[in-house]
Image (tube, helix red, strand yellow):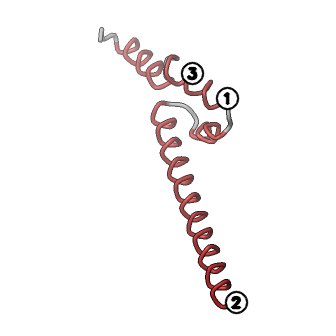
Amino acid sequence: MNNSVSSENFLWNIGIVALLLWIAVTVFIVIACWRIFARAGYPGVLALLMFVPIVNLVMLYVFAFREWPIYKELKELRHKVGSNF
């Protein structure tokens, strides 16, 4: 009986460790995506959409092939200054 309780505790502890690891990885991914979206000129909150199935694929497509807002702003500023970069 003691061996059974010991193995149940071991499995319970493994489950807790796995859950904590999953939470840590999820937080890391959200922070990384948030920073990438923000640096590209999009709202950082769009990073949360990366966890929604199908929407994440659409967002990845939009993110890859659409002109980033930061480049639009840069183009407008260069046009104002009159430089031809």
Q: What residue type is labelled 2?
A: Met
Q: Are marks 3 and 2 in contact (CB under 8 Å)?
A: no
Q: Which residue is drawn at 52% across and 54% down?
A: 25
Q: Which of marks 1 and 2 is in front?
A: 2
- Image coordinates of residue 66 in percent, x first then y, are 52, 17
Q: Nearer the viewer, mark 1 or mark 3?
A: 1
- Image coordinates of residue 49 in percent, x first then y, are 65, 37
Q: What residue type is labelled 1?
A: Ile
- Image coordinates of residue 51 in percent, x first then y, are 64, 41
Q: Is mark 1 on a helix, strand or loop?
A: loop
Q: Nearer the viewer, mark 3 or mark 2?
A: 2
Q: What whole-number distance in Å separates the C-alpha atoms at marks 3 and 2? A: 58 Å
N-term mark: 3 or 2: 2
**Badge 1 is on which residue?**
54
- Image coordinates of residue 73 in percent, x first then y, are 46, 21
Q: Residue at x 62, y 73 (%)?
A: 11
| Horizontal relation, residue 42 to residue 76: left or right | right
Q: Is residue 49 above or below residue 61?
A: below
Q: What element carries label 2?
A: loop
Q: In which quarter of the image is residue 23?
A: bottom right
**Badge 2 is on which residue?**
1
**Badge 3 is on which residue?**
62
Q: Is residue 20 above or below residue 84?
A: below
Q: Quadrant of residue 52?
A: top right
| Horizontal relation, residue 55 to residue 30: left or right | right
Q: Which residue is drawn at 29% across and 12% down?
A: 85
Q: What element carries label 3?
A: helix
